[in-house]
Amino acid sequence: MMCNTRLSLSLGLSTTPPHQNNKKGKLSTNDDNQELTLCLSTSSECTNNYDNDRINPQLLGGVNSSVSSFSNTSSVKRERYASSFEEEVENLETKKVLLISPKGLIDHNDDDEEDVHDYGTRKKLRLTKEQSDVLEDSFKEHTTLNSKQKRDLARRLSLRPRQVEVWFQNRRARTKLKQTEVDCEILRKCYEDLKDENRRLNKEIQELKSLKKSQPFRVQLSAATLSMCQSCERTYNGGATDNSTKISFSIGDQKPHFYGIPSQIH
DNA sequence: TGGACAGGCACGATTACCTCA
DNA sequence: TGTGAGGTAATCGTGCCTGTC
């Protein structure tokens, strides 16, 4: 989508975005010609081709050089990660141009260890308990954030806005997954109950059929004369006036309620 | 006024790192 | 010490909405 073009700079260097080369996002070069990449760009040019979270700003030098081939992406989400990018670029103001070698990043200013990642691996942040708690509290208040809330939260937690955004996305996903599991369990229970009910009703039908056979003159059943008791709130044959033939079933009862039928049937 | 386009955002699916048993 | 499972941060692709030209 965003990073699907190889960049060919005027220096004749090229690369493929890290995340496209392999699953681990390792930087690699074209083995055939052993090209190296030298990224010379300001933030805006680079964000035109890379999501800020997908290419480390450290890969970008502070050289203010416009490179035309950086601006060819049509659906670049320029602003999406802009704040985080700019923040990091700001941190890198003093850094020099960084070279990317086949073995990864060569940092010429490696006194700041936190900023120096081996971009052969995707560094994974572990949020502290405090950060998680704050995010949880915030999530309880509102499950989505507007830009200002995101920025404020990020500043408060010393995170990048993008990280806050991702956390909320994942949190929403987890909530939804949990709710789906709950719903599934409820449906499963309903299904089991209905199955039991169906089994019970079938059994009663069989019992009534056999009863009809053994006592044909005492119980006259037909679909037209079956009715339900009012407590079941089921429809019944309102036209039937002969109480002696009305039979009622009550959902949940082990035995049907018979109206106007001799008690020995029970 | 309608269409094309870009940006922003949310989402689902997936990947990959990390921890722990 | 190696390993598999689970949790989760991060990535990717896509669709929808909105603003602008």
Image: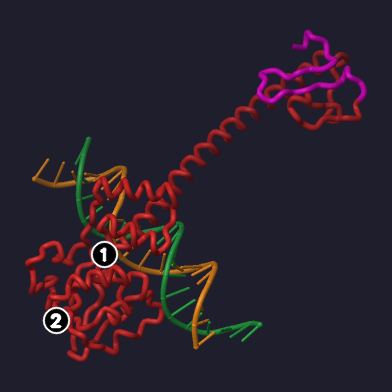
Chain colours: A red, B green, C orange
Residue drawn at (13%, 77%), measured in percent from left and top? A98
| Nearer-the-camera pick, A146 or A167 | A146
Report the chain holding disc 2: A
Whether callout 1 and callout 2 share a subunit is answered: yes
Q: Nearer the viewer, residue A210 or A4?
A: A4
In percent of width and height, residue A150 lies at: 36, 60
* Residue that appears at 40% across and 50% down: A139
Q: What number is the disc on residue A34?
A: 2
* Residue A140 appears in the figure: yes
Looking at the rendered structure, the secondary structure element under dot 2 is loop
The first of marks 1 and 2 along the sequence is: 1
In the picture, the disc for residue A23 is 1
Any magenta on residue A135? no
A168 or A261: nearer the viewer:
A168
**Residue farthest along the bottom direction in this orientation:** A10
Position of residue A105 relative to residue A124, above or below, is: below
Q: Residue A5 location in percent, x, y?
A: 31, 81
Residue A76 horizontal side relative to residue A68, left or right: right
Answer whether labels 1 and 2 touch (C-beta < 8 Å): no
Percent position of residue C4, x then y: 25, 45
For the stretch drawn in magenta, the main secondary structure is: loop
Query: Label for residue A63?
Result: none
Q: Give, as a single range, the part of the protein colored magenta.
A: A241-266
| Residue under the point 43% across and 49% down | A141
Q: Amino acid at mark 1?
A: Lys
Does the segment drawn in magenta span residue A249?
yes
Percent across and percent down for residue A97 are 13, 80
Res C7 quadrant in image = top left
